[in-house]
Amino acid sequence: MTVTGFEFFGKYTETTPTKGKEETVEKAKKDAVELAKNSFFVNRVIKDEVKKLISYIDLTTLAGDDTRSRVEKLVDKALAPVSNDKSLHCGAVCVYPARVKDVVNHLKTLGKKINVASVAGGFPSGQYHQKSKLLEIQLCVEDGATEIDTVISRGEAIDGNWQAVYDELKQQKDACKDAHLKVILATGELQNDENIYKASWAAILAGADFIKTSTGKETVNATLEVAYIMLKAIDKYYKESGRRIGFKPAGGIKTVEEALGFVALIKIILGDEWLTPDLFRIGASSLLDNVIKAI
């Protein structure tokens, strides 16, 4: 069944699915603790579970002093994070728009491929004119970005103007052309579960390929509690449409245990079929080093 367009928004957002949230999050935390604890022992299944974390990571640098040489080193690390295992690589590299060409040119020089993600669309605040957001996305795609991490207009969301949120994202999806659109909800600024759920649906109905928790710049970033609400929207949409939407927690995820918490939660709500880089990413910078230590 085709389920796109804002006309479906009211139907699917009448009730926010909070029932069972605390129990499910607690179970995910316990599962993550056990996996992280056992990863240091000789258990191949668990070791493989931890190794998989590398393939989910969007290795990220979003600093004002980023340079060409810094992002080139980031690419090198993403392509071969573990020197003695060439099969392992990150899901993508994620940079600012001005650095996309540096990433693409370095990959061409190396003769290698990896997903190239760029934040855009007025990141991180979203407080920009829509015309400039669309131009930024267009230019990133022209420079070679294969994924765009945009951000919703939180002011419109908080005011309940969901049509405006949807309309902006629909235009941004069109501007992406063949690039995937990952929509950042900035959940730490949305105030409550109802707004997080509605923002998830506005993004999904506008054509998002992924929904993402945070910019990493908010006071509160990725948590299992907000992930529960977002995953419930993804689950409902899949059951109604048959289309799988990806999920990306980002911001503050540093330890193996924290990352495994999101893996466990996805297993509970969506199932193992979502545990692929095509449908699950983690926005992180320091997490990779901690995963390498654990394996």
Image: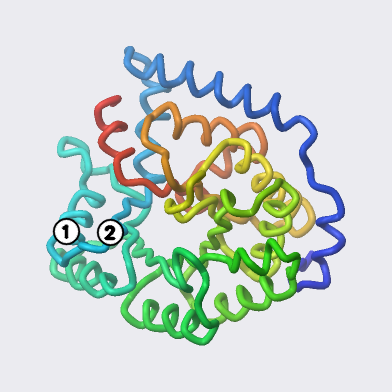
**Residue 141 in which image quadrant:** bottom left
Q: In the rendered view, would you say 27 is above or below 96?
A: above
Is 292 placed left or right of 133 in the picture?
left
Q: Residue at x 23, y 67 (%)?
A: 103
Front in this rendered view, residue 157 or 262: 157
Label 1: how many Cα within 10 Å (few below 14, some 14–19, many 20+): some
In the image, what residue type sits under mark 2? Ala
Q: Residue at x 71, y 32 (%)?
A: 21
Q: Secondary structure at mark 1?
A: helix
* Residue 31 percent coordinates (x, y): 54, 21
Q: Secondary structure at mark 2?
A: loop
Reading the chain from its start, which is encountered first: label 1 or label 2?
Answer: 2
- Report the residue marked by disc 2: 63
Q: Residue at x 48, y 19 (%)?
A: 33
Q: Residue at x 29, y 56 (%)?
A: 61
* Residue 48 percent coordinates (x, y): 38, 28
Asked if the residue at tag 2 contacts the one at tag 1, i.e. Cβ–Cβ closer than 8 Å, the answer is yes
- Report the residue marked by disc 1: 70
Looking at the rendered image, the quarter that the N terminus falls into is bottom right
**Residue 17 in which image quadrant:** top right
Q: Nearer the viewer, mark 1 or mark 2?
A: 2
